[in-house]
Amino acid sequence: MKFSVEQRDGNARAGILRTGRGDIPTPVFMPVGTQGTVKAVEARELEEIGAAIILGNAYHLYIRPGTALMEKAGGLHRFCGWNRPILTDSGGYQVFSLASLREITEEGVRFRSHIDGSAHLFTPEGVVDIQRSLGSDIMMVLDECMPYPCDEAYAQRSNAMTLRWALRARERREQTSPLYGHEQALFGIVQGSTYAGIREASARALAAMDFDGYAIGGLAVGESEEEMYRITGVCTDILPHEKPRYLMGVGTPQNILESIERGVDMFDCVMPTRNGRNAVLFTRRGKLNMRNAAHAADLSPVDAECPCYGCRNFTRAYIRHLFKAGEILALQLATIHNLTFYLRLAAEARAAILAGRFAPWKASMMNALSPERAEADTTPQ
């Protein structure tokens, strides 16, 4: 994997992440396909709307269907019919969310499956092995995503362990080889809650380990947006400028624009897909709730400026009808629309950086996307 920065505009960067399965222009939004599928859309449709890379999750795919089947299938790409790059999360966040079912020690994480209660152990080495079985193009180290808020002493201890785990994961990557003929990059993950000093130490230690790229984890877990932006900036100021930076699990369109301005290259979030399945659609003039009665007889598209299949072929009235009738097509069209919106947002940010116009473009977009423009939920009960 090779990364090059083509243009800087302030701290914002436009780059290219080159992988064996294709080039990824950055900034990039990565649709979340936790269990080997992006909910409600086909791989073919993801290609049509321009997704350059998607996510899978090592925890969920290890639990079901398991690594034995994955290897028999020839890896995750062949299993799910996606030929472009895939990033797999290590499962650290999922372990964080299973607080009542897990125990964290220096060895790793012992946990019980959320499906059948069976006992399992994740170690830094084992998680690399799982991702070797999946064959993802970008692997993530095992980390502890600490809760918010947490005291500084806990954050210090937790991050120190995450750094030791990162070194073990890096060593395991060097001891093993890809199974399917494609190089697999490994990213380290900066932790440290909202403590700038711990984040700085984490970023410097990981940079010294010379990972292929770096993620900023443990944000968007309850802290304020101001704290999230502050910590993001602390990390991007230190992380190597010649390596890609990935802000994990973030977030709203506004979050993404603010973070691009601070030097982040890669993003993922379930927000466009989850909101879409719940009838909330993103547009360049704010969010719309498609269940609202105001759309019942509206024969205009959801967003006249959007090139997605739904906006080119259907009306707000029809999409509202699909949601009210409980039709599966509603989830599909809404998800495709929201993903198209997010992918276009990243692509337009890239174009603005290349043109040296990121600041005025961002200001215009932030004004258009202001929360005040979001449609109130007036759906009749």
Image (tube, helix red, strand yellow):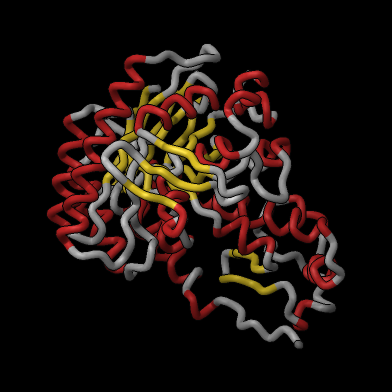
Residue 196 in view, yes or no:
yes
Q: Quadrant of the N terminus?
A: top left
Asked which quadrant contains residue 21, the reply is top right
Residue nearest the viewer, comparing 80 with 47? 80
Q: Is residue 177 above or below residue 83?
A: above
Does 68 sit left or right of 184 as displayed? right
Q: Residue at x 47, y 16 (%)?
A: 178
Does 247 sit left or right of 34 as displayed? left
Residue 245 in view, yes or no:
no
Q: Is residue 368 above or below residue 259?
A: below
Asked which quadrant contains residue 108, the reply is top left
Q: Quadrant of the C terminus?
A: bottom right
Q: How many marks?
A: 0
Residue nearest the viewer, comparing 125 with 356? 125
Residue nearest the viewer, comparing 69 with 282? 69
Asked which quadrant contains residue 79, the reply is top right
Q: Residue at x 70, y 68 (%)?
A: 279
Q: Residue at x 48, y 28 (%)?
A: 131
Q: Position of residue 251 (x, y in %)?
A: 46, 58
Q: Residue at x 61, y 51 (%)?
A: 339
Does 56 sit left or right of 149 as displayed? right
Q: Position of residue 321 (x, y in %)?
A: 85, 70
Q: Position of residue 51 (x, y in %)?
A: 59, 39
Q: Is residue 332 above or below residue 167?
A: below
Q: Position of residue 231 (x, y in %)?
A: 24, 57
